[in-house]
Image (spheres, helix red, strand yellow):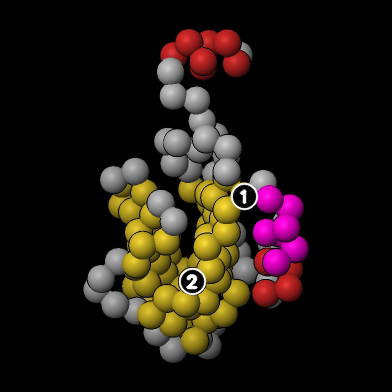
Amino acid sequence: FIATNGKELSALKALGDRSYFEFNLVKSKQPYKLGDVMVTLKNADMKRNRYTIELVADDKKVEKKDKSLNEPVQFYMSKYRQPCEIVVNQVSKDRIVGYLSQPKVLAPRTATQTASNQ
């Protein structure tokens, strides 16, 4: 389920199965720390409600180009079993507003735990 406004985001937070980090990101050269990831806004197209961001997660840099409003951008991190998700609810001139959703359950670390879960 994707929250498109503050009320819906509050309802998702109340479920408690994921961590939510709201952001108001301005275009800049410096990355913004959001939960466990670094995000840089590269471009925001207000007319078409599209944006381009650069993500740095697990020391890997990925550019997500021409994403739409309320389109979930999913990516995996080594410490989570489920994908993390960035959703942007508002695109304005050189600014995006939205949230990052990360699972609260961490993936097991040791080989013995991994073998017993299968």
Which secondary structure, mark 1? Answer: strand
For image coordinates 24% across by 73% down, the residue present is 29
Residue 42: x and y, percent?
A: 34, 72
For image coordinates 25% across by 71% down, the residue present is 30
Which secondary structure, mark 2? Answer: strand
Q: Which residue is mark 1?
A: 18
For image coordinates 44% across by 14% down, the residue present is 111
Magenta region: which residues?
A: 10-16
Q: Is 75 left or right of 1, judged from the image as shown?
A: left
The count of marks equals 2
Q: Is residue 44 magenta?
A: no
Q: Quadrant of residue 54?
A: bottom left
Instruction: Please determine whether, in this image, residue 92 is positioned above or below residue 13.
Output: below
The answer to whether residue 16 shows anywhere in this view is: yes
Q: Amino acid at mark 2?
A: Phe
Q: Amino acid at mark 1?
A: Arg
Who is closer to the viewer here, 28 or 114? 114
Residue placed farthest to the left in the image? 29
For residue 66, the mark is none
Q: Crowding near pointer 2: few (<14 within 10 Å), some, many (20+)?
A: some
Look at the image and tell me in which quarter the N terminus lies. bottom right
